Amino acid sequence: ALVDDGDEQWIYHSSCIRIRPDTSRVDPVFLAAYLAYPPVVDELLSHVQVGTVPVLTAGSLKALPVALPELRKQRLMAGALSEVALQMSVQHRILARLEAVGQGLFTKILGDEFPGMAASRPTGALSKSKVPRTRRTNRMS
């Protein structure tokens, strides 16, 4: 997680390692993205001390080689990655909305024919638009 000095929120756990990069050499957003990059995560995980609870020590983190382009490039990459993350977030919200609309269509179209919904209908009441049900068959038969 990237925690800005101005953040009012605190992250504390005995399993957390706080990294304070030299901002004259490393852009914090770039570093957070770099440490989340799957090949770097794999490298980090290869240094985990295996036990009941896997442990990554500060020493093994310090020994991790970090590819540092010039600071200007780091900031450009960080900006581009932030834009990609924003677009991904927008797309995830759109997808969630479309999933909800799809679910709503089933409820709207099938109404009380939807499995489990018949119990909410008063006994003896029949839908005027009741469509005859077809027999379900197994695709293997």
Image (cartoon, rainbow, N blue to C red):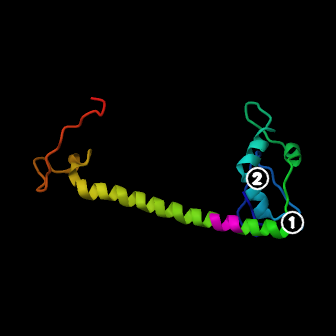
Label 2 is placed on what type of residue? Leu
Q: Residue furthest front?
A: 140
Rendered image: mark on residue 56:
none
Label 1 is placed on what type of residue? Glu
Q: Please check the rendered image and state whether residue 81 is part of the magenta-colored stretch, yes or no.
A: yes
Other-residue count near label 2 (Cα within 10 Å), few / some / many at <14 / 14–19 / ≥20: some
The residues colored magenta run 80-84
Measured in 3D between alpha carbons, the distance from the residue under mark 1 to the one under mark 2, in whole angstroms, is 17 Å
The residue closer to the viewer here, 78 or 93, is 78
Q: Secondary structure at mark 1?
A: loop
Q: Where in the figure is residue 86, as x and y percent of width and height?
A: 61, 66
Quadrant that contains the N terminus: bottom right
Q: Where in the figure is residue 96, as x and y percent of width and height?
A: 46, 59
* Image point (73%, 58%), residue name: 33
Tell me: 56 left or right of 25: left
Q: Residue furthest top?
A: 141
Rendered image: mark on residue 70:
1
Rendered image: mark on residue 35:
2
